[in-house]
Image (cartoon, coloured by chain):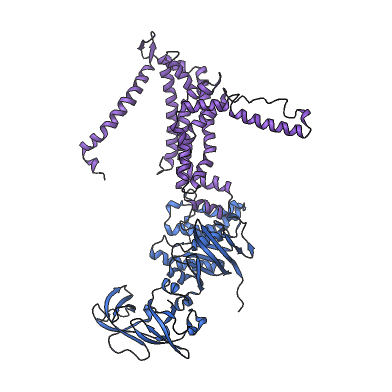
Chain colours: A blue, B purple
Amino acid sequence: MAEPPAIISVQGVSKRFGGITAVDRVSLDIRQNEFFALLGPSGCGKTTLLRMLAGFETPDEGGVLIDGQDMTDVPPNRRPVNMVFQSYAVFPHMSVFDNVAYGLRVANTPSGEIGERVHEALAMVRLSEQAERKPDQLSGGQRQRVALARALVKRPKVLLLDEPLSALDAKLREAMQLELVRLQHTVGITFIIVTHDQHEALSMANRIAVMEAGQVRQVDGPAQLYEFPGSRFVADFIGKMNLFPARVVDRKGTELMVEVEGLGRLTLPGQAPHLGGPCGVEVPVGQDVGIAVRPEKVHIHSDGVPDGRIALRGRVSEVAYFGDASHVYLRLDSGQVISANIRNETRTSDPSVRAGEVLWCSWDPKDTLILDR
Amino acid sequence: MDSWRKNPLVFWVLNLSPSAWLIAFFIVPLALVWVLSFGEKRGLLDVAITGTLDNYARALQPLYLEIFWKSIWMAAAATLVCLIAGYPVAFAIAFAPNRWKPYLLLALMVPFWINILIRTYALIAVFRTRGYVNFTLEWIWDQAHSLLAFLGLGGYELIGARFVPLELLYNNFAVSLGIVYAFFPFMVLPLYANIEKLDRSYMEASLDLGAGHWRTFFSVVFPLTWHGALSGVIIVFIPALGAFFIPDLLGGTDSQLIGNVIERQFKAANDWPFGAALSFLLMYATFGALALRAIVAGRKQGLEV
């Protein structure tokens, strides 16, 4: 299958503010019709990168191509991209209709066409009824949809979204996530979203770039990123992770023997390098590594542990109840704490899983990740 | 927080001194002047309060109405200049790097530490026939003259045979400029406060949607900061309307503003009742402007001054 062409090509872009390097030699290709997420903790440079795509910041080094055209000397008002701002920036002195029409009026679009396109855009975000309202008569979610309509009515090649859901409450946020995905399918253009919320990125994006300290750490699809993180940072940032320091002591075929601090020796299937992970089968003996397992891959047993699983014994130190699931924290004999997520599949949960009880936990060796230390 | 309101004693004690101050130094003198405006001059120091309206009738004669009108016109022109020049300055300060802002604001405020009279006299040194502006112009003329001579064009007197200094002082231009200079910071500060508060993303959104900088200013920035502009206009226009020593020092014989006329009644002409009547007419005009502003601002509810 041929790769779709890159609509945006970021080539070795750096940006410094004073002495701080906000974006550090980032190169990325974002494909046509992709829902792409820039994910990272605050201050990782993701918003600066987005603003460089919009033209509000100029790269100190490198350049940006949009649809094959160099954007270095192109000001924001001449770029074929539009942005949805974190604060929405819906003009408070204009009605919803005028807000959406603004970009078309600026471009001297004939008024008949303006009316048509604005109504079409408002229908798309389900705001047709509110066209004559002023922004202060709208809810946060509605204001955001005005911002979306205002950007989409310009028919940009790429829509940029800067933390678009961060100001919404949890329920609305979930609804808007679905709405954005639906919208992207409808308009069929590239969406680039900046977010610090991993769930948001995982649930919406086709591909995610994880950023840290101005650099892109990994670019992959959501499942790949979650199940095969390429580094300890990515593993830790996306989802929860039980991490143990370890050292490779031996290798037999594709199997690795690791000495895990406090847990003893484990035999793990070596990961193929193409599945991510800097270690894989090529990890030299003697290398310090981290081994990791996701809490939902860890099972809890009150008695026998099935064969072929890595099993550890510990005392329950805490159970955090979340309704659909519970997070169980087990203090191992070595003093380390491991967390396991159990689903509350029935209304009466296992009475033995409560603080103070001694239980077993186990996981499949195949679910173990080998990461950098 | 509002417990002090519930305790009447505290309320009265706290409000006593400012109220006393206002009454003693504002309401009472104002009332005296108001009463005086219905009086008749009887002697050098003697004024009889007779309830006459003659002073007002006299103040509304065409001669004085003309001066009123001219004062309003001059103050309005100066205010407009302040507004047009104020926006870029306020923008420059609001968009300056944070560590520069206090210094830029200070630069704007420092002249206020010097008496306005002294600053106005300084303007004379700048604008008089042998002042700094003309010195500079003369220097430029000299350079141009030498250049033309060097190019062999000296004989044609393209820029005149000799430098003629500009008459910048003692006319309406000088008065307007003096008023602009004196009250400019009053325009910049409210504008700055409003622009500083303005969410930058409104401007970015406008640019993002394809608007240029002018379009962004007139369609987005101005509509969102006009109440700051209005505050600036009011606090520049009102003192500009009453200015008297600026036209006195910088104006020519035809630059008399209503402030000068009022001053003269209280001093040289020693006609306090007439001066009082003129003062109150000026004040009513000012109230009218304020009321207009309140009505306009009242349409937009919830906007602060």
Q: Horizontal placement of B164 versus A357: left or right?
A: right
Percent coordinates x, y for residue B208 in the rendering = 55, 55
- Can you give x and y, in whole percent of width and height, for residue B157 in the image? 75, 27
Q: Is residue B237 left or right of residue A30?
A: left
**Could one spot residue A127 in this view of the protein?**
no
Q: Residue furthest top?
A: B43
Write the residue at 20% across / 36% down. Answer: B9
Relative side of B45 to A47, left or right = left
Establish if A361 lies above or below A190: below
* Pick the front one: A255 or B228: A255
How far from the left and from the top, in percent, is residue A95?
49, 51
Q: Using the image, determine if residue A73 lies above or below residue A186.
A: above
Residue placed most toward the observer, B144 or A238: B144
**Quarter in which the N terminus of chain B is drawn:** top left
Question: Relative to residue B53, is residue A67 depicted above or below?
Answer: below
- Residues A121 and B43: in front is B43
Quarter of the image where the C terminus of chain B is located: top left
Say above or below: A146 vs A300: above
Q: Can I make out residue B81 in this image?
A: yes
Q: Residue at x 48, y 38 (%)?
A: B107
Residue closest to the eye, A342 or A250 = A250
Q: Residue B69: where, in percent of width, then height?
A: 52, 24
Q: How many numbered marks are there?
A: 0
Query: Residue A362's quadrant in the figure?
Result: bottom left
- Pick out the residue farthest to the front: A286
